[in-house]
Image (spheres, coloured by chain):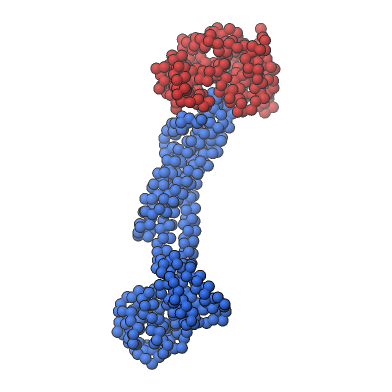
Amino acid sequence: MVSWMYLELARRNLKRQRMRTLLAIIGIIIGVMTISSVGIFGNSLKMSTIELFQDVANEIVIYPSFPDGYNSIDHQTLRIIDKMADIKIAIPVKSESGLITLGKKKAYVTIYGLEEDGVKELFDLKSGSVSLAGNNVVVGSILAEKFNLRVGSKIGLENHSFRVAGILEEKGRSFDINPDRGIIISERTFDTLYSGEYEMVIVKTVSIDNVEEVSKTIKDVINKRETKIRVWEMKNILESINRAFTYISRFLMAIAGISLLVAGVSILNIMLMSAIERTKEIGVMKAIGASRKEIMLIFLLETLILGAIGSSIGGFLSILGGYGIDLIILKSTKYIFIPKTALYVMEGVVFGLGVSIISGLYPAWKASNLEPIEALRYE
Amino acid sequence: MEASNAVIKLVKVYKIYTMGRQEIRAVNNVSLSVNSGEFISIMGPSGSGKTTLLNLIGCLDRPTKGKVFLDGVNVSSLNDIALTGIRRDKIGFVFQQFNLIPTLNAIENVELPMIFKGIEKQKREMRAKKLLELVGMEDKAAHRPAEMSGGEQQRIAIARALANNPAIILADEPTGNLDSKTGRDIMELLKDLNMKGRTIIVVTHDPVVAEYSERIIRIKDGKLDVS
Ligand SMILES: Nc1ncnc2c1ncn2[C@@H]1O[C@H](COP(=O)(O)OP(=O)(O)O)[C@@H](O)[C@H]1O
Ligand SMILES: [Mg+2]
C-alpha cells in the first residue's frame, strides 16, 4: 500500500528549492507549449489549405485511355455516365487551339466547347453573364486583361465574329481545365468550327462521400471489356495534401520537441543536484527502513509533479499560442476551437509527462542505489 | 553466553578497507555476543572502529569476513531487500546528528518507518502520538526539526527509532551533540526503554554515558580490548 505521504514528501522537497523548481516547470511549460501550439498551427494550415479544394473534391475526371489506343470519349460512354446515380452533373469537354483576332492583334488560344450549365458549375464569373447562345462567348480573365476585353467586345475566330458575354474569375492552377487564357464557346458552335471529339468528361458527384462509389461504377461499367477510360478522383489530391501537411506538421512538432528535450535535460540536472544534496537524507531513510523502491518512488514523484504542473499549464497556454500563431500567419482563428486541438494539447501533455519521467529515472535510480553507510557518512 | 539467548552474535568479524596499497582493518577479528534485554556501551577513541562495528550489527554494512547473527539468522548472507526489512522492523537507529528529515514535522518523522512498512494511516498516527508522549514530545508534534532544540530532536529521533517496535536500539554517540544535562535526560530515556525489555547498544567515548549500561565493550584499532 503506497501512502499519500510520499506525494506530500515530494511536494515539500520541491518547495525547498522554489527557484529551481519554478525554472524546471517553466522549461516544461515552454516545451509543451511549443509542441502543442505548433501542432495546432500545422493542423490549421492543413485545414485552410484543404478548404481551398473542398468545392472540387467531389470531382471525378474521366480521360480516354491513351495507352490502350483510345484518344477520345465516345457518345455512348457519355450517355451511360449521364444516366448513373449520385451524379450531380457530367460535363463533356472539347478543346482545340485556334487563332483569334482582336482588332489588329492576333493570338493563338485554347478554344473550349462547353455547355452553359457546365461553365456555371466549373467557374466563377467576374462580369457579364454566362451565355453561349448565338455568337456569345465567355473568356478567361488573363486573356481579357491582356487584350483589354470587356463585356460586348468583339472577337474574330475562324472567319466568324463573336461577342464577349462574360468574363471569368481567374481560376489559377487546376487539375481539370483552366480557361484563364482561353475562350469558351458552346458545343454546337464548336462542332460547326472544328471536328473534335470529347477529350474528357468532368463528373461532379452529389456529395464527397459518393466519389469512390461513383468512380468505381464508372470504371466497372465502361471498362467492362476493354480499358477505354481512365478515371482520376480529385479527392486523391485532397488526400495527398492531407498527408503532406500531416508530415509537415509532424516535422514542425519534432523540431519544437527539441525545446522539450532541453527542459528534460534541465530536469535531469536539478534532480541529480537534488539527489546529491540529499545524499545524507537518503542514507537516513535507508537506515530506518526505506528500500530502493521507496527512494525511487519519492524522486520519481518529484519529477512527476514537475511534469504534471508544467505540462498542464503548457497545454493550456498552447491553445493561446496556437491562437496567436494562427492569427498572425493565417489571419484566421476558425480552426482553433475544434476537437482536433484537444488532441494536440493532449499530445504535448503526454510528451511533457514522458520527458519528465524519463529525465527523472536516472537521478531516481542513482539516489536509490546509494549505499546507506556511504550516504550516512556524506556531509 | 548461551547461544539461545543471544539476539546479536558476531563471529570473527572483519571490516577491511583498502586504500591504494594500505589496508585499514576498521573492525579486526571481533567476536561478540549480546543477550536480549542487555544495555551495552561500546567505548574507544576516535577512529577505533565503533561506528563501523555498530553499522555491521545494524545491517547497514556487510562484513569483509566473518558472520553476524541477529536472532540466530546469519545476516551476512542476506540480500539487500532482506537487510532493508531487518533495518526497518528489528532495529532502531539513533544518530549523533539526530538526522531527522527536515521537510517533515515531528510526528511525520516518527511515522516515516511505519510508512515504509506500509502501516495504514490511522494506526500509524495513533502509534506515533503514543511514542511522542513516551518521549515527552506530544506538544511538538507539528514542529519541524529546525524549530526544535538538539535535545528535543534527539527525543523525536528516539521515538522514530521505536516506530516499528524493534527489539534492538543502536545509538551512535547519541549525546555527542548535546550539553551534559540534556545528554543525561536522553540516557535516562534509553535506560527506561531498556527497563521495558529492549536491547540497547550505545556507542560513546563519554564515561558518564557509559555508566548507564550494564556492560562496557572497549575497542581499540578495530580490536576488542579485553582487559
Ligand atoms: N568507507 C571507508 N573507507 C575507508 N576507511 C574507512 C571507511 N569507513 C571507516 N574507515 C576507517 O575505519 C576506521 C574506523 O572508523 P569509525 O568506525 O568511523 O571509527 P569511530 O566511529 O570509532 O570513530 C577509521 O580509521 C576510518 O578512517
Ligand atoms: Mg564514529
Residue at image location 41% in from the left, 56% down from the top: A41
Q: Nearer the viewer, residue B197 or B218?
A: B197
Side (left or right) of A258 relative to B4: left
Q: Nearer the viewer, residue A373 or B199?
A: B199
Residue at image location 44% in from the left, 65% down from the top: A209
Residue at image location 38% in from the left, 50% down from the top: A319
Q: Position of residue B89 (x, y in %)?
A: 56, 21
Q: Position of residue B78 (x, y in %)?
A: 65, 25
Chain B: its colour in the image is: red
Q: Position of residue A31 (x, y in %)?
A: 45, 47
Q: Nearer the viewer, residue B178 or B195?
A: B195
B1 relative to B18, above or below: above
Total residue callouts: 0
Whether residue A157 is visible: yes
A29 relative to A103, above or below: above
Whether residue A57 is visible: no
A130 relative to A320, above or below: below
Q: Position of residue B17 (x, y in %)?
A: 66, 24
Ligand 1, seen in the image, is in the quarter at: top right
> Which chain is assigned blue?
A
Residue at image location 66% in from the left, 12% down from the top: B4
